[in-house]
Image (cartoon, coloured by chain):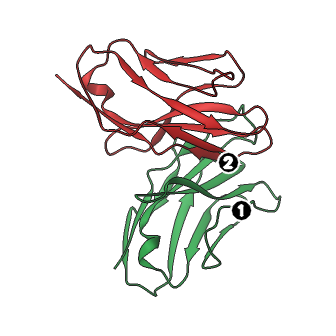
Chain colours: A red, B green
């Protein structure tokens, strides 16, 4: 079946540091890939997505590129802010289905 | 407009009791999903409703879990004879349709604690 593996946290960074959260997946066919974010006390929100190989999703300064050859969808941001402190989830949606399969989540803490 | 709402926000129950969790999707959204977020299992899919089609129940962990969606809108997730391992945050999501073009919007969740 489908699965998503992402790096465990917590990840602690200083403001303006570079952030990378690794995500790899296993799926049949051609899934769509997502990053969701859960800010403290809030619900899960879609951050960005990519629907086919080599697509780059971007939003709020975050980027992730769908790499089929390495089955990866790593999340990056060049200069993080305190407000980026949250839990980040990598997820996939299979070509034939509608449900999301999530990774375990990575907690990110950005210190001023 | 209003987002996905869930009630109650917190529920504490004794082992063996039944509980009902409610989800109000965004108006006009035809697809509705239930997920569970727990320490041991992460975020996992439970069940999916799309319009009048038969629901996809493939993620329900046992026959103690059931869900219904009345009138294509509100959904209730019922857990019978609750066990401690059922303690988790239950998330509901809805989307305007099925397929990749339609983003799933998540509610704030119901935190269930089984004592």
Q: Secondary structure at mark 1?
A: loop
Q: Which mark is residue B58?
A: 1
Q: x, y percentage for residue A103?
A: 52, 43
* Camera-nearest residue between A103 and B23: A103
Q: Are marks 2 and 1 in contact (CB under 8 Å)?
A: yes
* Camera-nearest residue between B20 and A93: A93
How dense is the environment of label 2, judged by Cα within 10 Å: few (below 14), some, or many (20 and up)? many
Q: Residue furthest front?
A: A70
What is the chain identity of the residue bearing mark 1? B
How dense is the environment of label 1, judged by Cα within 10 Å: few (below 14), some, or many (20 and up)? few
Q: x, y percentage for residue B19?
A: 49, 78
Q: Which residue is mark 2?
A: A99
B2 to the left or right of B27: left
Q: Secondary structure at mark 2?
A: loop
Q: Residue furthest right?
A: B53
Determine the CA span between mark 2 and mark 1. Answer: 10 Å
Q: x, y percentage for residue B3?
A: 51, 44
Q: Which residue appears at 66% of the width and 16% of the height?
A: A55
* Camera-nearest residue between A59 and B94: A59
């Amino acid at each position: 079946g489908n699965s998503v593996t992402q790096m465990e946290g917590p990840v602690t960074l200083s403001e303006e540091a570079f952030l990378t959260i690794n995500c790899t997946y296993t799926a049949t066919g051609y899934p769509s890939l997502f990053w969701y974010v859960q800010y403290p006390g809030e619900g899960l929100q879609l951050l960005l997505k990519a629907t086919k190989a080599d697509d780059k999703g971007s939003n709020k300064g975050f980027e992730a590129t769908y790499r089929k050859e390495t089955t990866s969808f790593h999340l990056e941001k060049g200069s993080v802010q305190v407000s980026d402190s949250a839990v980040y989830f990598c997820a996939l949606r299979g070509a034939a289905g509608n449900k999301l399969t999530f990774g375990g989540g990575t907690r990110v803490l950005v210190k001023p | 407009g209003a987002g996905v709402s869930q009630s109650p926000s917190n529920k504490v129950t004794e082992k063996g009791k039944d509980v009902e969790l409610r989800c109000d999707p965004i108006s006009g959204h035809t697809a509705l999903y239930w997920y569970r977020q727990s320490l041991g299992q992460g975020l996992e899919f439970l069940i999916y409703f799309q319009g009048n089609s038969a629901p996809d129940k493939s993620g329900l962990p046992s026959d103690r879990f059931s869900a219904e969606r009345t009138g294509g809108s509100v959904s209730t997730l019922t857990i019978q004879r609750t066990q401690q391992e059922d303690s988790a945050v239950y998330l509901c999501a809805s989307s305007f349709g099925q397929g990749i073009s339609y983003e799933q919007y998540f509610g704030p969740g119901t935190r269930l604690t089984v004592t």
